[in-house]
């Protein structure tokens, strides 16, 4: 395994593995026994960065959200896991009532909602202090300053280590960081967005915004990460839900643009030359890119996880990277 630092303050900086494990479906589609086996294998391989959310996975039948955090808490207690594994969670998108969604009935990002959500997450995870906490989706009903102060207070109190943000427009991220700087508060340092070798279209309206796909790492966001050295990009859905390799998982309209065929051909060529799978090439490319990202991979089996773990040791040549970048 390889590792990198996230966070700029020595008091809260964390060392994490360059490959993160997503626990979204643990406790719903992935039963606890299988989830434990996946987590055990991840840690055995040197993995130290696990991701969840307080609303995972409310959309599954019979779920109300929080199941993933509960499974992680059970695993931590049963294995005696402490600070050696960094747990990241999110708040703001949990539905307020069963059977509703996050678009029209989310818990939101008010100061009171933040406090309540953190209390629930710490209890389910069995943690007195959350390692990394994200604002999951924007809350247009709350002033950004209230959210910034609410998150900053948690770090100053020692309840949270690092702060992150997901699925916000780049201008919202920068405005929140500017507000935090102006008030001497800790601000967002980790950005979690959908990002992969195939770039996602940003012009398609989404549930959260008529202006385009809100959670995609576009040029504005990537430029911010390149310029601001205290920022880390964590990339969710890096393998596009199997879309690179499975005929039954079409990429869909989000990847229906001119560069896709050429980049897919480049991926196949490099994979063949490297003796690796297409998925492994995607992950290796992201880890070592000019704007590096920490891929956040899901797994429903140990075998699936092992394929992703092998990508960490895949060293692409200069020529292979140039082939991929130029496509």
Image: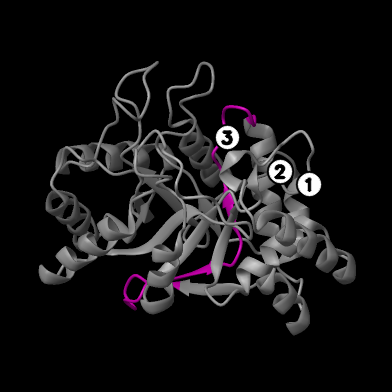
Quadrant where the N terminus is found in the figure: bottom right
How far is disc 2 from disc 3 in space, using C-alphas? 15 Å
Quadrant where the C terminus is found in the figure: bottom right
The residue at the point 62 percent across, 46 percent down is 256
Q: Position of residue 252 (x, y in %)?
A: 63, 38
The residue at the point 11 percent across, 70 percent down is 182
Residue 25 is tagged as 3
Q: Is residue 18 magenta?
A: yes
Instruction: Tell whether 186 sits left or right of 216.
Output: left
Q: Secondary structure at mark 1?
A: loop
The residue labelled by disc 2 is 242
Up the image or down, 20 lies above or below 237; here it is below
Question: Mark 2 near mark 3, Cβ–Cβ under 8 Å?
Answer: no
The residue carrying pointer 2 sits among few (fewer than 14), some (14 to 19) or many (20 or more) residues within 10 Å by Cα, namely: some
The residue at the point 40 percent across, 44 percent down is 212
Residue 245 is tagged as 1
Is residue 309 in view?
no
Outermost residue, left side: 183
Instruction: Tell whether 127 sits left or right of 173.
Output: right
Instruction: Tell whether 259 sits left or right of 303.
Output: left
Question: Mark 3 near mark 1, Cβ–Cβ under 8 Å?
Answer: no
């Amino acid at each position: 395994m390889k590792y990198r630092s996230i966070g700029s303050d020595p008091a809260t900086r964390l060392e994490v593995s360059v490959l993160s494990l997503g626990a979204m479906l643990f406790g719903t589609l992935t039963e606890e026994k299988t989830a434990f086996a996946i987590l055990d294998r991840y840690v055995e391989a040197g993995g130290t960065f696990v991701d969840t959310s307080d609303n995972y996975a409310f959309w599954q039948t019979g779920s109300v959200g929080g199941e993933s955090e509960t499974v992680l808490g059970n695993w931590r207690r049963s294995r005696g896991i402490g600070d050696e594994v960094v747990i990241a969670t999110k708040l703001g998108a949990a539905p307020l009532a069963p059977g509703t969604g996050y678009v029209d009935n989310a818990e939101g990002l008010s100061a009171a909602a933040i406090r309540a959500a953190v209390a629930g997450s710490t209890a389910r995870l069995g943690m007195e202090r959350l390692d990394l906490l994200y604002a999951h989706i924007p809350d247009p009903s709350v002033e950004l300053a209230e959210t910034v102060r609410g998150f900053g207070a948690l770090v100053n109190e020692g309840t949270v280590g690092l702060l992150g943000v997901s699925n916000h427009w780049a201008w919202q991220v920068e405005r929140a960081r500017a507000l935090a700087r102006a008030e001497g508060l800790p601000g967002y340092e980790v950005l979690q967005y959908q990002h992969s070798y195939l770039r996602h279209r940003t012009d398609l309206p989404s549930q959260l915004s008529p202006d385009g796909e809100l959670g995609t790492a576009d040029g504005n966001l990537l430029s911010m990460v390149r310029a601001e050295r205290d920022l880390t990009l964590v990339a969710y859905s890096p393998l596009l839900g199997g879309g690179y390799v499975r005929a039954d998982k079409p990429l869909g309209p989000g990847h229906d643009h001119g560069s896709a065929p050429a980049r897919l051909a480049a991926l196949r060529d490099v994979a063949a030359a490297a003796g690796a799978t297409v998925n492994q090439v995607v992950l290796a490319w992201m880890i070592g890119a000019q704007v590096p990202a920490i891929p956040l991979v899901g797994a429903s089996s140990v075998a699936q996880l092992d394929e992703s773990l092998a990508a960490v040791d895949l060293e692409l040549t200069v020529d292979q990277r140039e082939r991929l970048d130029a496509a």
